[in-house]
Image: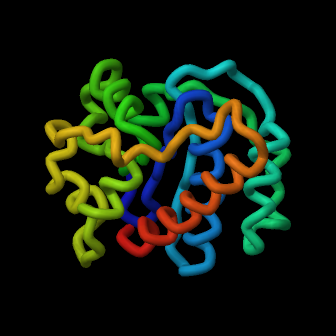
Amino acid sequence: MTAETPCIVTLCTGNAARSVMAAFMLEHWGAALSVPLDVVSAGTHVVEGQPMGMRTRAALASIPELADVRVSGHRSKQLSAEQLDRADLVVAMEADHVRFVRRHHPDSAPRCATLRRLCLDLHHGDDPLTLRVASLGLAEAALDPAEDVADPAGGDVDVYVACANELWLLTDQLIRRI
């Protein structure tokens, strides 16, 4: 973990849609706003090494600012202790992902919350991100399924596009708090 370049882990179930889109979006926002970030995406229950699916690609391309982003290098990754050790912040797409971190990686629980929770509770400031995140008491925070970003898996392209649009707005809010 470093104060100069925060490491953010985006987390969903299969590392196939939500966490992948959120990672690309945070990278875009970081570059656009000159906020240096090291962003990694992962999943809680992953088939390792899978490329990004057509619907996730189409959803990303539906955001005009991301239409030309190169996504061919993505391969699905299971969340690892190494990723968490480097993470200043773990941005989960739903409450179940936070529960997973609390159960399997309790030392990382104070740095893990849903994207919506972070958009509400994390405040921009002069203190380093690590201190601002630590002050939130995330390891004990109540989990509300209403904070979930719905999983588009199994849906058609329109469902993925709707998810991408939701994530676009949320990642815009989050980057301004980092």
Q: From the viewer's side, name the closer residue of 68 and 81.
A: 68
Judge from the rendering whether residue 84 lies leftward or rightward of residue 139; answer left or right: right
- Which residue is located at x 57 percent, y 38 percent? 151
- Which residue is located at x 24 percent, y 61 percent? 121
Relative image position of residue 46 (x, y in whole percent):
61, 22
Number of marks present in the image shown: 0
- Which residue is located at x 42 percent, y 47 percent? 91
Quadrant for residue 17, please give it: top right
**How is colour applied across the structure in the image?**
rainbow
Judge from the rendering whether residue 7 lies leftward or rightward of residue 117; answer left or right: right
| 109 to 35, vertically: above or below | above
Q: From the viewer's side, name the closer residue of 145 and 104.
A: 145
Relative image position of residue 146 (x, y in whole percent):
34, 46
Judge from the rendering whether residue 55 lies leftward or rightward of residue 153; answer left or right: right
| 105 to 42, vertically: above or below | above
Q: From the viewer's side, name the closer residue of 107 and 100.
A: 100
Relative image position of residue 120 (x, y in whole percent):
28, 63
Q: Quadrant of the C terminus?
A: bottom left
Relative image position of residue 3 (x, y in whole percent):
36, 62
Quadrant for residue 153, please give it: top right
